[in-house]
Image (cartoon, rainbow, N blue to C red):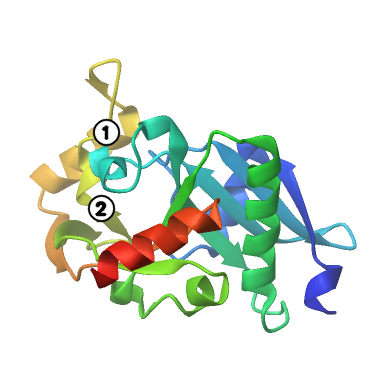
């Protein structure tokens, strides 16, 4: 199997939900906004999944003039059996589709989480620019399952009400089952659909 043999196709969130929750290190996509989803297949077998969506906070203001022109690469996972360089090729295919079919998107942001040993090598290989680090944050570790939930997961509301999943987490927090932990800042990477924007940002940084 070669990277070129992997077929990247837009799909519904429901098609990759179980795969992401099983294979992504977070094991969770609850509360994750999704705008564009992609499946990665080889001979009909699901080998990976990618999910892009709006940023969960007002962090978009750092990268664009409007929320609609900024999206975040929220989830990316490929099975270990995929060949070397598969991640960068898959990302490239996804970005190409978005550039062609969602022309209002100007900036794609992604974070490499050092709390899981990630430094962003795959984003560098995909022509993303390193844009510093995110702020320090807090998460909660479930003492029973070992799962880690970002602090945002306990604040997510729908029409002014906490979602059932959030209510369960907050109850576990009250019961002392969720243990607060401090998170290291994440490496922030940015991809500009128009490479001229990337050059302008680089020149601005040098100035």
Give the position of the C terminus as an image quadrant: bottom left
Q: Mark 1 vs mark 2: which is more N-terminal?
A: 2
Compared across the picture, whether 74 is left or right of 61 comes to: right
**In-front residue for pair 87/103:** 103
Q: Position of residue 203 (x, y in %)?
A: 34, 66
Mark 1 secondary-structure assignment:
loop
The quadrant where residue 100 appears: top right
Residue at image location 29% in from the left, 62% down from the top: 204
Tell me the tag on residue 185.
none
Q: Name which quarter of the figure residue 169 lies in.
A: top left
Let me know if residue 39 appears in the view: yes
From the top left corner, tell me how far across and down residue 193 is, in percent. Answer: 55, 51
On the image, numbered disc 1 is attached to which residue?
Answer: 156
Mark 2 falls on what kind of element?
strand
Confirm whether residue 112 shows in the render. Answer: no
Farthest residue in the right direction? 43
Farthest residue in the bottom direction? 84
Rendered location of residue 135, percent (x, y):
16, 60
Rendered view: 150 above or below 124: above
Q: Is residue 84 above or below residue 94?
A: below
Camera-side residue: 200 or 112?
A: 200
Query: Are the residues flagged by discs 1 and 2 in contact, CB closer than 8 Å?
Result: no
The quadrant the N terminus occupies is bottom right
Q: Residue at x 22, y 61 (%)?
A: 134
Residue at the (24%, 19%) spot, across then down:
161
Q: Which residue is mark 2?
A: 150
**In the image, 36: left or right of 124?**
right
x and y, in percent, of residue 31 in the image: 38, 38
Tell me the crowding category of disc 1: few under 14, some 14 to 19, or many 20 or more residues within 10 angstroms, Cα based.
Answer: some
The residue lying at 9 percent from left, 43 percent from top is 174
Alpha carbon distance from label 1 to label 2: 11 Å
């Amino acid at each position: 199997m070669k990277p070129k043999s992997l077929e990247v196709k837009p799909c519904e969130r429901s098609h990759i939900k179980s795969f992401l929750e099983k294979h992504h290190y977070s094991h969770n996509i609850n509360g994750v906004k999704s705008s564009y989803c992609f499946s990665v297949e080889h001979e009909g077998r699901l080998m990976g999944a990618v999910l892009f969506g709006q940023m969960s906070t007002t962090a978009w203001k750092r990268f664009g003039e409007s929320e609609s022109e900024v999206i975040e690469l929220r989830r990316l996972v490929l099975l270990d059996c995929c060949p070397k360089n598969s991640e960068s090729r898959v990302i490239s295919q996804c970005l190409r589709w978005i550039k062609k079919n969602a022309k209002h998107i100007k900036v794609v942001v992604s974070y490499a989480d050092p709390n899981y040993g990630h430094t962003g090598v795959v984003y560098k290989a995909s022509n993303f620019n390193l844009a510093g680090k995110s702020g320090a944050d807090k998460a909660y570790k479930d003492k029973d399952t070992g799962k880690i939930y970002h602090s945002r997961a306990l604040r997510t509301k729908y029409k002014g009400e906490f979602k059932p999943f959030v209510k369960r987490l907050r109850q576990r927090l009250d019961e002392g089952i969720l243990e607060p932990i401090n998170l290291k800042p994440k490496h922030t990477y940015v991809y500009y659909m128009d490479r001229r924007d990337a050059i302008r940002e680089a020149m601005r940084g040098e100035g």
